[in-house]
Image: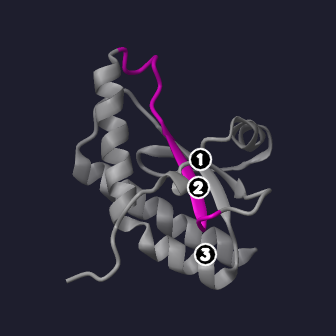
Amino acid sequence: MNTIRETFNKSEKLCSRKIITSLFESGNVFYTSCFKVVWGKSPVLLPAPAQVTFSVSKRGFRLAVTRNLIKRRMREAYRKNKTTLYEHLSSQGIQIVFVVILKGNMVPDYLIIERSIKEMINKFIANTKLN
């Protein structure tokens, strides 16, 4: 049985409009099979190694129910797979903030989202090792 609880707390959610705006102005961008990820090192001290927000375009998905379903799946996949990212960031002494934006206009299956989240985490680990 896992001793570490896989949770997604308020402290891990990126809510600051100022930080989100600065990310879109001067953040780094990379793509996975499902997502566009805009990220940067945190300008302020965070309570968690990373803060994230998830976004699904209104243009691609008119119904809020559909957008919420996709974001719920994205958060769940991140929650279950974030431990490797957190361990890496803690060992490097880095704190990051990022926005995950869904590409395309098809509702992806949970397994596809999870695979893309794992791909995103691996790219983060590769990108933060270089710096």
Q: Earlier in the sequence, mark 1 or mark 3?
A: 1
Residue at image coords 23%, 43%:
109
- Residue 9 lies, in percent from the top left, at 45, 56
Circle 3 or circle 2, nearest the eye? 2
Residue at image coords 79%, 38%:
25
The magenta region covers 47-62
- From the image, tell me which residue sits under label 2: 51
Above or below residue 14? Residue 122 is below
Q: Secondary structure at mark 1?
A: loop
Where does the C terminus fall, quadrant-wise? bottom right
Where does the N terminus fall, quadrant-wise? bottom left
- Residue 123 lies, in percent from the top left, at 54, 65
Q: Secondary structure at mark 2?
A: strand
Which of 18 and 67 lies nearest the eye of the viewer? 18
Residue at image coords 72%, 38%:
24
- From the image, tell me which residue sits under label 1: 14
- From the image, tell me which residue sits under label 3: 89
Under mark 1, the amino acid is Leu
Under mark 2, the amino acid is Gln
**Mark 1 → mark 3, Cα distance in angstroms:** 17 Å
Above or below residue 75? Residue 101 is above
Q: Is disc 3 surrounded by few (<14), some (14 to 19) or many (20+) residues within 10 Å? A: many
Q: Are discs 1 and 2 less than 8 Å apart at CB?
A: yes
**Mark 3 → mark 2, Cα distance in angstroms:** 12 Å
Under mark 3, the amino acid is Leu
Q: Secondary structure at mark 3?
A: helix
Image side of residue 45 versus residue 108, left or right: right
Above or below residue 27? Residue 24 is above
- Residue 48 lies, in percent from the top left, at 59, 65
